[in-house]
Amino acid sequence: MIDTHPSLYIAPTLGDALSALGERGAEGAAFAGGTWIMRAPIRHQPLGRAYVALGKIEELQRVDVTPAHVEIGACATHATIAAALAPCSDLAVLAEAAGRSANPAVRSAATIGGNLMAADFAAADLVPALLCLEASVEIVARDGVERMTISDFLLKRQYLACDRLLSRIRIERADRRSAHTRLPLRKAGDYPVAIVSLSARIEAGRLMEPRIAVGSVEPVARRWTPLEAALEGAPIDIAAARHAAEAYAAYFQGREGIEAPGWYRISVLPALIGRALQSLSS
Amino acid sequence: MTLRLTINGRESLAPDDPMTPLVDLLRERFHLTGAKPVCREGFCGACLVMIDGEPTLSCLTPGGLAEGRDIRTIEGLSPAGRLNPVQNALEAHDAVQCGMCFPGMVMTLTHALRRNAAPSREELRHALTGNTCRCTGYERILDAALSAAGALQGGEP
Ligand code: FES
Ligand code: FES
């Protein structure tokens, strides 16, 4: 008789995980925190056939912080990332994204790798934060390592070969400030209707090289490049930034959802830009 | 496949597949019905149990990943019918209404008060972000928890 129950192999090392994923082929899938996969039944999706759990692999849990860069293992949880990055003011956007998403029990389980690999999860907080930090990711396979920008990864992640694994996220540090703002329907513990992540250098009260990413409004987070161009070199003026955001809001096509219609997600963006700027300048 | 779980200090065997949510094993296999599968999404906290001392969503935890770990359910927090200080305080403050959310509330508050003997009301509010109650309005729960502060230092239960 064929066993139709899903299997779960707990990999002790990264090498074992890669071998196991290679052996399982198209039926295999990595299992990190489980907060997305375990909800498959309520999305009316079947569970996979053969999971490879990554939670025991020490090197995937680590967050290494140096003055020049930060490297985050794909299985670091939101709670771990929020604690590790709390002292890094340049990375406030990521610390806030990790420390405010969902609720404490989810933050203790959900991982950065899971957040990035859940391609259907539009409301992932870490994705816009990583976009505005211009993070890069490392993909490992038994025959080598590949690195790519976070933007490239978001385009390619659904087509990642089954024996390849997102292993690490790297962020180069710089003399920048950053902020993360989100609008959940309840004050806390909910998916955000819209997210704005912002990072910029501030010189003589002006925004330099602003990077703005918007999450949860469309199916996949992306940079708001026309607004970035409009705010380049502009003085920090919250009312003016909100007006600019209104002028460029048509850049997005809001996704319809049970919790909010598309137009509403777009209509809150100028207010979120204002809040992000406020927190950047305070 | 047989799962070997340590629940409330006792080793228990479950002939189930490893992706079965822990909450279903607890309730259906071991008849420990304190943890409730309400949303199965990680939103409500009604399914919380302690795993290795940390509040953990049993709806999102596959049984196979709970093997070899110390699982404590609400039933294990009051051995021989002795309520723990949080449970006592909730009863004394008449905080419980339908009771559906309380096994999870007790897990979160017990953990929060073990880590911080003198939390503020705001800190407890933050700790309860993932525990939804549809009956009480939370204020009496917070009153009860604040009154139990300090009573959970120094270990079990
Ligand atoms: S049932 Fe697990 S959080 Fe609601
Ligand atoms: S007492 Fe009824 S849900 Fe909390």
Image: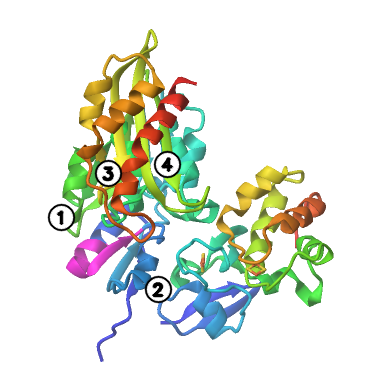
Quarter of the rendering containing residue B76? bottom right
Q: Residue furthest bottom?
A: A1
Residue A167, x across and y down, in percent? 30, 47
Which residue type carries mark 3? Answer: Ala
Cα gap from disc 1 to disc 3, whole angstroms: 18 Å
User: Circle 3 sits in a helix, a strand or a loop, which is it?
Assistant: loop
Q: Amino acid at mark 1?
A: Tyr
- Residue drawn 38% across the image and 67% down it: A39
Residue A159: numbered disc: 1
| Whether residue A119 is visible | yes
Q: Nearer the viewer, residue A226 or B41?
A: A226
Number of the label disc, if any, that sits on residue A182: 4
Residue A221 tag number: 3
Q: Which residues are magenta?
A: A20-31
Q: Confirm whether the magenta stretch covers residue A23.
A: yes
Mark 2 belongs to which subunit? B
Do marks 1 and 3 share a subunit? yes
In the rendered image, the vertical position of residue A17 relative to residue A136, given as above or below: below
Nearest to the eye among marks 2 and 1: give it.
1
